[in-house]
Image (cartoon, rainbow, N blue to C red):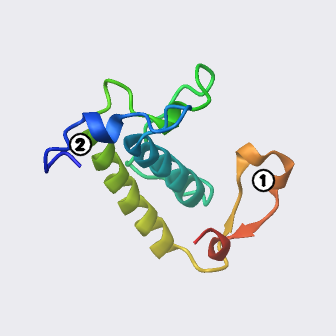
Amino acid sequence: MEGGGAGRARPAAARTPTGTSLLGLIKHCAGVEHAYVVECFGRTSPAQPVSPDYEADPNADLYATADESAAFLIARYRAVGGAVEAAIAEMDLDSVGRVPWWGDAGRSHWGSSWCI
């Protein structure tokens, strides 16, 4: 994204009324993939996605802030991808995960085959 003359302006530009941008989608996907595949299955990883302040803005993971460059967010996404691949390699298809932010529904069992 950084090459080819795209620079920061185009991938960071808001494309919707919520402010969603291409970089925001990369940021969002990194967080979702890490949460559902790594955290919900009890794994840990040194790769940590950006932790937006959802209290301040519920859409905070859908756009890049001024401090979040394309290179930074892409590197985070790649690191998370490695953590997700490692977590999947460690699991069986019948591994059980729990989603704490789903409340009571998150306490029920769901398998890695559903997630993958």
In the picture as drawn, the residue positioned furthest to the left comes out as 4
Residue 47 visible at all: yes
Q: Earlier in the sequence, mark 2 or mark 1?
A: 2
Residue 48 visible at all:
no
Which residue has dot 2 on it? 71
Q: Is residue 42 above or below residue 26?
A: below
The local secondary structure at tag 1 comes to helix
- Residue for point 53% across, 57% down: 38
Tag on residue 106?
A: 1
Viewer-nearest of labels 2 and 1?
2
Q: Residue at x 28, y 48 (%)?
A: 75
Q: Amino acid at mark 1?
A: Gly
Give the quarter of the image for residue 9.
top left
* CB contact under 8 Å: marks 2 and 1: no
Which quadrant would residue 58 be assigned to in this image?
top right
In this orientation, which residue lies closer to the viewer: 45 or 79?
79
